[in-house]
Amino acid sequence: MAQKIPDSMPDWIREHIELYRRDPEKGHFWDASLGGGSGMLTTLLLTTTGRKSGEPLTLPLIYRPTNDGNYCVIASKGGAPAHPAWYLNLQANPRVEVQVASDRFPAMARDAVGEEREKLWEIMVNYYAPYTKYQAATERRIPVVVLEPIR
C-alpha cells in the first residue's frame, strides 16, 4: 500500500514519513516538542484507503501498544472541530496497513468504547499530555482507535 507522499502534506509530516521509510528504527521515534509535548515518542505509520479517492493515505501517529497485542492511536487532529481524514477513511474501510518500526502488517481498526476507551485514553494522555488540551479545544469526543493486527 506504499505510495507517493502528497505535496499538500505539511513538511514535518512528509519528513517524518520519509525518515520512517528510509530508516524505520529512527523513524519510529518522534520529537514530541514539535507538537507541544516533551521527549521522544513512538510512532507508527498508518495507511488507510481514501473513502473518496480509493488511494492509500499514510500518516505517522503516536501510539501505545495494548496488553493484548493491539495498538492504540488517537484521532485528535490537534483538537480541530472535524475528525481527521484518516479516521473518516477507516470508518468507511477499517482494513489498514500498519508499520511499527520495521514490522509491517495488515490490521483492522475499530473505535474503543466504554471502559476500554477510558482506560486507553488515560494511557495515551499520560504518554502525550497535549491530548487533554486537544479535547478541551473541541466539542467532538476525540476517538480512541484500536488497531488489531491480522496475522
Image: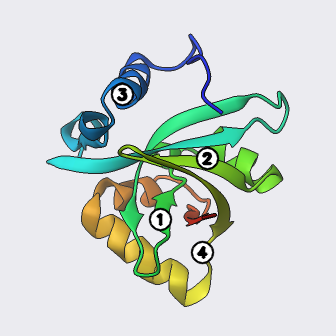
Locate the C terminus and report the quarter of the image it occupies.
Answer: bottom right
Residue type pointed to by label 2: Glu
Instruction: For the residues labelled 2 and 3, say whether their Cβ atoms are less than 8 Å apart.
Output: no
Can residue 136 be seen here? The reply is yes
Residue 142, percent from left and from top: 56, 61
Q: Which residue is mark 1?
A: 71
> Which label's residue is closer to the chain start, 3 or 4?
3
Given this view, does label 1 or label 4 mark the residue nearer the observer? 1
The label on residue 16 is: 3
Which residue is at a point 76% across and 35% down the rendered structure image? 50
Q: Which residue is mark 4?
A: 112
Residue type pointed to by label 4: Ala
Q: CA distance from mark 3 to mark 1?
A: 19 Å
Given this view, does label 4 or label 2 mark the residue nearer the observer? 2
Q: CA distance from mark 1 to mark 2?
A: 12 Å
Q: Neighbour class for label 1 at 10 Å: few (<14), some, many (≥20)?
A: many
Task: Indicate left or right for 66 with 6 as reference.
Answer: left
> Which label's residue is closer to the chain start, 3 or 1?
3
The label on residue 97 is: 2
The label on residue 19 is: none
Q: Neighbour class for label 4 at 10 Å: few (<14), some, many (≥20)?
A: some
